[in-house]
Image (cartoon, rainbow, N blue to C red):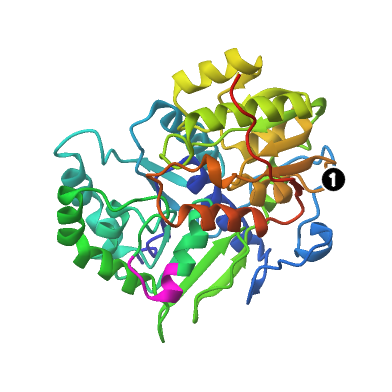
Amino acid sequence: MTPPAPTLALVESPVQLLNVLEWAYARHRAAGPLLTAVPTQPGPLAARAPGVQAPPAGAPYTPPAYAEPLDVVVLPPTDPMSRGQLRRIAGIARDEGHTVHWQEARGGAGAPARALAALAGRVRGAPRIVVGDPFSRFVQLLLVPARAAELVVVDDGTATLEFVAQLDRGERLRRWHRTGGGAASRARELAYAPVSAAARRRLTPRDGSGVELFTSMPVAPPAGARLRTNDFAWTRARFGPPRLTRGTDLVGTSLVETGVVDPAHYLRAVRSLTAEHGATRYFAHRREAPEKLRELSEATGLEIVRPDLPLELVARRGPIGRTIVSFPSTVVHTLPYALTGTGVTVAVCDIDPDWITAGASPRARGFLAGVTETARDVRRLPRRPAPAAG
């Protein structure tokens, strides 16, 4: 008898692959029961989230004997940092017993078409498909021939917040920081609209369709969808607990690179946080520009760290500061889970409205404020404008 086709996972970033591993672990162990909403009330995280207790210190980790290992397809971006992190976590995924296939879909005129042709059979035959980025045009194209009875959406960071909101409002899927663009961009959007609409329908729960959301974000599931809390149980079982340093670590953001935050304001804000909290290290986002990081280091004296894995794994392995300061980003939601029971404090610094560029999306201000306001088990730093230059 031919064995059933395995679950197919489509990932494009290191964080997506990490969350696919978390989903497989949670499903295998039946950890993180299905909920109607992720808790948002204040209080100790460990008292609220099922299964959130960390494993005993020093307990050996043995990969579970998955009844159904995943078939993971990595669709890598072109930037070297992302590719390096993906290769490292892909090795970890193979150690867990999953199959990992590396498929280039970018970097050349013919790459997308070749990738679509190579993956069409896999997509059509998969009984369950796990996706990490429902906004990805390439993933949306792959969903067109899909016949899967179940679709699972795992976190691609805070974009999950906007994904759920857009499904609830019946809107087309569009990244929160994307602006309208010029005439050529609008023409491309119009030509692509049928594919985007088909993907949105495919991802919208309906009678008889299985759609699951696996997330650390504080969202209620779309009507008809299942929700499973990602409490980073695999990360806590696999790594750590970490050794803590005496200092404070800052976490960088790519908001400058995406055109949301003014570079000069960001530099002054980092300089202010460094002085105020005695920070010594700056964990760079994988998309931060090298020139920007050199300027930050020269202006603040911070040691710039380019993590080789997603920050949740780096922090869990340690060493890590007793305090971690971040701007509004995914890690203010995920690190409290990953670092539960370690004594690390996660603090978040709001983005002042004056820092936001004139060309940023109209949604930017409200979205970033929502990321901060909904974060659990973090210390909120008082909002204040960046100090004047000079």
Q: Name the residue at 36% across, 42% down.
A: 101
Q: Local crowd at mark 1 within 10 Å, few (<14), some, or many (≥20)?
A: few
Position in image of residue 151 (x %, y %) = 42, 68
**Where residue 79 sits in the image (x, y, percent)?**
37, 30
Quadrant location of residue 302?
Answer: top right
- Identify which residue is drawn at 25% across, 49% down: 181
> What span is in magenta?
166-172
Residue 369 is covered by the magenta coloring: no
As drawn, is 162 to the left or to the right of 173? right
Question: Can residue 66 be seen in the rendering of this structure?
Answer: no
In the image: residue 86, left or right of residue 215: left
Above or below, 245 relative to 329: above
Which residue corresponds to the image point at 58% horizontal and 72% vertical from the top-left? Answer: 220
Residue 232 percent location from the top left of the image: 66, 51
Disc 1 marks which amino acid?
Answer: Pro
Q: Residue furthest bottom?
A: 207
Which residue is labeled 1 in the image? 56
Q: Residue at x 48, y 55 (%)?
A: 159
Q: Nearer the viewer, residue 122 or 152?
A: 152
**Split into 4 quadrants, where in the image is the N terminus?**
bottom left
Which quadrant of the figure has residue 304? Answer: top right
